[in-house]
Image (cartoon, rainbow, N blue to C red):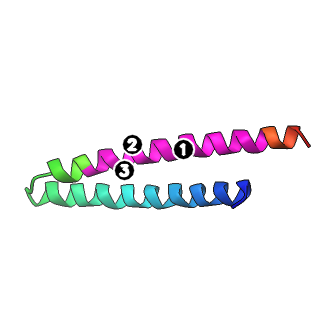
Amino acid sequence: MGLQEDIERVEQHIREIEERIARQRAVITQAEENGLPTEGPSNFLWFLKETLSLSRDHLARLLADEFRAGDSR
């Protein structure tokens, strides 16, 4: 798999995580409105946010690699 394919894959992963975060926020809001516990859903939201952060870091490294590869051409 080439560098550009890796970048596209990570960008897609980031979009998917962002969608999951939006859905998880809705789950938490609904739980709050219904007087249900939110600790579990909130912990999962934290996990999703951490995953998003790591994925963005990964994307930044890939983009830096792409930039450096362009300089060497």
In magenta stretch: residue 66: yes
Q: Out of 52 and 36, give the one closest to the viewer.
A: 52
Q: Quadrant of residue 63?
A: top right
Q: Earlier in the sequence, mark 1 or mark 3?
A: 3
Q: Position of residue 66 (x, y in %)?
A: 76, 45
> If the image is split into quadrants, where does the C terminus sit?
top right
As drawn, is 45 to the left or to the right of 13?
left
- Against 40, residue 71 (above or below) is above
Residue receiving disc 3: 48
Q: CA distance from mark 1 to mark 3?
A: 12 Å
Image mark for residue 50: 2
Residue underneath mark 1: 56
Left-right relation of 54 to 48: right
The residue range painted magenta reads 44-67
Majority SS type along the magenta span: helix
Where the N terminus falls, by quadrant?
bottom right
